Amino acid sequence: MSDSVHTVTAMPTTRRPGCPFDPPAELLEARGHGPISRLSFPDGHQGWLVTGYDQVRQVLADPRFSARKELMRHHPQIDYGGMEVPPPAAPGEFLLTDEPVHSRYRKPLVRRFTVRRMRLLTERIEQVTAEHLDAMAQAGPPADLVTAFAKPIPSVMICELLGVPYADRGSFQRQVDVFHSGEVGDEELIAAYTGVQTYLAGLVAAKRANPTDDILSELTEGDLTDEELKGVALTLLAAGFDTTANTLALGTFALLRNPEQLAALRADPDLADGAVEELLRYLSVAKTSLRVALVDAEVGGQTIEAGATVVLSVNTANRDPERFTDPNALDVRRSGGGHLAFGHGIHQCLGQQLARVEMRVALPALFARFPTLRLAVPPEEVPLRPETADLYGVRCLPVTWDA
């Protein structure tokens, strides 16, 4: 173990004024001291902060580091106040489990989220995108791009994949919005979460009784219980909606703030795939991930002791100068991917191909339909989601255009 190690006394939560797309400066500074630092948690726990690309990737793929919910006793931003050991993940919520439980839930889903199967949805995503762009045009400027564009497209697609009836989608999505926002009180959060759980339980029962053409109906043919199917559906909902919605809105904001990059993308449609990967890297809306060391393990020249909570800073890993040239610049011509925006290892995002197709379709269509699209407020007045929220993004994005 190295004799000296940098210490971060509190998880950085403030981005620099005028730099809404960059990680907090203290995180970038920590990475400058080395790929791993000590981190003091609000409850006094001494854990670790991993900021280097290779080291984050290593931990994500290492079975010596657990994602199990019941081991997550310390939070980098919240003092749980000596609460009891958290319960294990609910049945089906596989993101908070390790092997072999994880594979029991994920394996039936893999063939339903292949690159080929997701690309077959392209035409439907084009239709949904066109419908919402038509609605924007008809309503006229200005508009909130979050509610008019960024949220509805992934929302419609995940609802269709799960088989949520059209008549239920409005109320269902409102509840989902509440528990994803990270900006409501505990009582409202619990009510929304309970409402979504109750709805999904009824949806699973309906699919079991009368299967339709959707993923949830297909899963009822396997050996998963109704409780497990509800948990799987909740996980897919969480993974398949909010991350893409935030990346679409924040990505639009980033392109509008980098007009030379937007001009390059408009001039060469073949850049779209690479631009999507670059936005995923540059923005890293799923900015952190937590793991707990099951045994002593060496990472970045430091021995992480068994039982320590490890914060993986995905956004600084995706800005690591040892992995990416000029990492703090948005460059839609950047060659190659390799970012960690979708994670790595067994928990790598199952819906990443769906997110890619949605972004690949939606962003070029937006800028083609509204060539004069621009911010309707000064950039510093765009309200950002707090750094304490699970996902980073904008709360709303006021835009306008020449009607």
Image: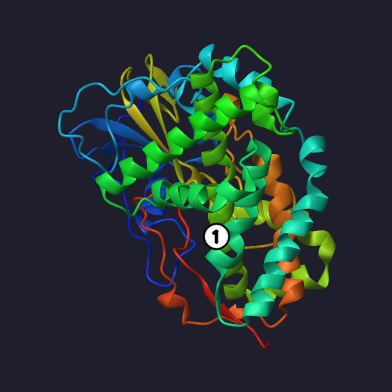
Left or right for 25, reference 283: left
Q: Position of residue 374 (x, y in %)?
A: 60, 80
Against 135, is 11 above or below?
above
Scheme by which the image is coloured? rainbow
Q: Where is residue 183 in the image (x, y as percent from the top left)?
A: 33, 54
Left or right for 35, reference 212: left
The residue that appears at 75% across and 66% down in the rendered structure is 365
Question: Who is closer to the viewer here, 400 or 3?
Answer: 400
Mark 1: few, some, or many residues within 10 Å (few <14, many ≥20)? some
Residue beneath disc 1: 328
Q: Quadrant of residue 351?
A: top right
Q: Where is residue 139 in the image (x, y as percent from the top left)?
A: 62, 79
Q: In which quarter of the image is the N terminus?
A: top left
Residue 320 showing in the rendered view: no
The residue that appears at 47% across and 77% down in the rendered structure is 379
Against 317, is 230 above or below?
above
The residue that appears at 79% across and 36% down in the rendered structure is 117
Q: What residue type is labelled 1?
A: Asn
Q: How many labels does the image show?
A: 1
Q: What element carries label 1?
A: loop
Q: Quadrant of residue 162?
A: top right
Q: Where is residue 246 in the image (x, y as percent from the top left)?
A: 53, 56
Question: Who is closer to the viewer here, 39 or 100?
Answer: 100
Against 124, is 82 above or below?
above
Question: Who is closer to the viewer here, 49 or 235?
Answer: 235
